[in-house]
Amino acid sequence: MLDDAIKFIGGTFVVSAILAWLIRSLVTHFLSKDVESYKLQLQSEAATELEKLKHQLRLVAAEHEARTSLLQETRSRVIAELNSKLIDFIGAAESLVSLAEYEGQPSKPEKAKVLGERAHEVRHYFIRHRIYFTEDLCAKVEALFGATNLPALRYRIWLPSVQAGENTRGEYHKAWIAAWEALKDKVPPLEHAVRREFRELLGVEARTGIDTT
């Protein structure tokens, strides 16, 4: 009797153990399937979000490139126009204060009038477009403008009195020589510095500094 009871209990324990093992195995199996499925779902969602992010980054990069290209195109146009006006302006100043006088040339008052017009044009254009340049380059353009215009302006001041026959030839000639020397000695280095930076902005020459525009 006791042996039968022990056998029964033992058999029940074995059956229970087997059932417990089966249940645990089934739960583990289904859980592992759920985990794997969840893992695959996460990987899929992550891949989708990554592609979205890559797409957004490509859009941002394309927009930035378009803006940069537009800025460079506009800046190139501004540089070409400003450089052309500077050439005309400096040429008019050189023509006015030149020590050599040739027959058939416009008179000094006529040349002074042209210089005044060219000075206004280059100054007005530069002020309206200086946003495209660094402050350092703006300072160089202003230095070039001043070194060209101020000596010539002092010389122009004496023209009416000389034309009127007043006894001011001494001051007139001093101002003339000073203007010519400024155009010959001071202006070329400033002009070279401005044009060098123009070329750097256009990519014609390697940059010597950092453009912070």
Image (cartoon, helix red, strand yellow):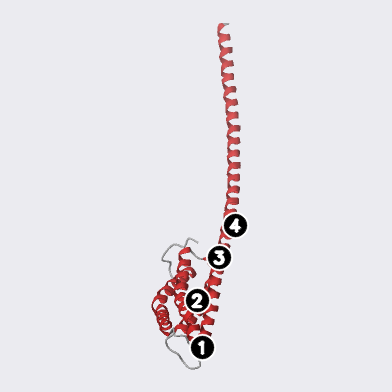
Q: For the residue marked with disc 3, what is the amino acid? A: Leu
Quarter that holds the N terminus? top right
Residue 204 in view in this figure:
no
Q: Is residue 65 left or right of residue 177?
A: right
**Mark seen at residue 59:** 4
Task: Tell me the mark number nearer the camera, choosing from 1 and 3.
Answer: 1
Q: What residue did someone put label 2 on?
A: 86
Toward the viewer: 116 or 51? 116
Residue wearing tag 3: 71
Res. 124 image quadrant: bottom right
Q: From the viewer's perspective, is the residue at label 1 or at label 2 nearer?
A: 1
Q: Residue furthest top?
A: 1
Q: Residue at x 57, y 62 (%)?
A: 67
Gap between marks 1 and 3 measured at Cα:
43 Å
Residue 101 lies left or right of residue 13; in this view the side is: left
Q: Disc 2 and disc 4: Cα gap in Å?
A: 40 Å
Q: How many marks?
A: 4
Q: Residues within 10 Å of mark 2 (few under 14, many from 20)?
A: many
Q: Residue 210: x and y, percent? A: 44, 62
Image disc number at residue 107: 1
Amino acid bearing label 4: Leu
Q: Residues within 10 Å of mark 4 (few under 14, many from 20)?
A: few
Q: Is residue 5 visible?
A: yes
Q: Amino acid at mark 1?
A: Ser
* Separation (CA) of disc 3 from disc 4: 18 Å
Q: Give coordinates of residue 190: x percent, y percent.
A: 42, 73
Percent of width and height locating residue 194 = 45, 71
Please tell me whether residue 147 is drawn above or below residue 96 in the rendered image: above
